[in-house]
Amino acid sequence: MVPHSYELPAALLLIAGGFLACFAGYRLFRIVLGIYGGIAGAMFASSLVGAAHPIGMVVAAVIGGIAGALILVFAYFVGIALIGAGIGAFVAHAAWTQFGAGDPPWYFVVILVVLGAAGAMVLQRYVIIFGTAFGGAWTLIIGALALAGDPTAARAASSANVWILYPMTPAPGQRWLPIAWIALGVVGVAVQLGVTGKKRK
């Protein structure tokens, strides 16, 4: 979480990071890992400081962001496995909500997380392209909505709002978001497979 006055820079960072991830995630994977590690580290560290201490929140966000970025950049293969695990967890939740009520059983999530991590290590290039394209697309959408003044997106851009993590369950009145996210993610995959993520000869 960051103070209200820092929502604009946070939105711009999300837009820039989302754009890079969506359209050049494979080519710039270490940079993308650093950006997302920084965002995650900043959100976690700043959430540990009370909202009454804005300077402390900013300092914690900076320190946490640097730590998160370094951890993911230096843990390249861990980052790939985490992307696969994240895809597995997303598939588990998305599939369960279509066929059942409530949260999926823990063992179902664990199985798909393990399969996702293992598959990511085997199919690294494609997992990186798909993971960064769709992750970047969602980050870009959140940043753009926050920049446009959407109050829900602004809160998501500046805090650990759960809405930012679940693109298939958008905020009320924004049911178009999953369609926009999927369309932008598909475009990102196409750009990476055809241009930025092509294997060098």
Image (cartoon, rainbow, N blue to C red):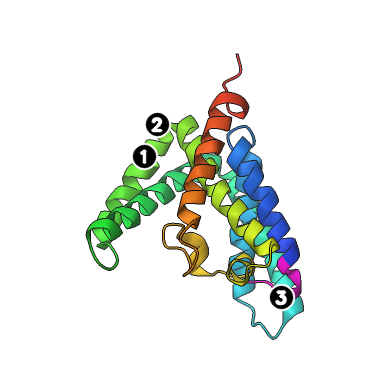
Task: Assess whether mark 1 and mark 3 are in contact (beta carbons under 8 angstroms).
Answer: no
Q: Are marks 3 and 2 in contact (CB under 8 Å)?
A: no
- Local secondary structure at mark 3: helix
Q: Answer few, some or many: residues within 10 Å of disc 2's Cα (few below 14, many 20 plus, some between 14 and 19).
A: few
Would residue 128 be visible to someone looking at this image?
no
- The answer to whether 53 appears left or right of 185 in the picture is right
Residue at numbered disc 3: 4
| Disc 2 to disc 1: CB gap under 8 Å | yes
Q: What amino acid type is highlighted by mark number 3?
A: His
Residue closer to the observer: 166 or 30: 166
* Residue 107 as seen in the image, left or right of residue 180: left
Q: Quadrant of the N terminus?
A: bottom right
* Amino acid carrying mark 1 in the image: Ala
Q: From the viewer's perspective, is residue 119 above or below residue 92?
A: above
Look at 42% across and 31% down and name the residue there: 123
Q: Please indicate whether residue 63 sits to the left or right of residue 98 in the image.
A: right
Q: Which amino acid type is shown beneath numbered disc 2? A: Val
Who comes first in sequence, dot 3 or dot 2? 3
Residue drawn at x 50%, y 43% as measured from the top left? 183
Q: Please tell me which residue is depicted at 67% across the width and 60% down the height of the picture.
A: 65
- Residue 118 is tagged as 1
- The magenta-colored residue range is 1-7
Q: Quadrant of residue 199?
A: top right
Q: Is 158 covered by the magenta stretch?
A: no
The crowding category of the residue bearing disc 1, from other C-alpha atoms within 10 Å (few below 14, some 14 to 19, many at least 20), is: some
Queried whether the magenta region covers residue 4, the answer comes back as yes
Query: From the image, which quarter does the C terminus lie in?
Result: top right
Question: Which residue is most to the top?
Answer: 201
Residue bearing the label numbered 2: 122
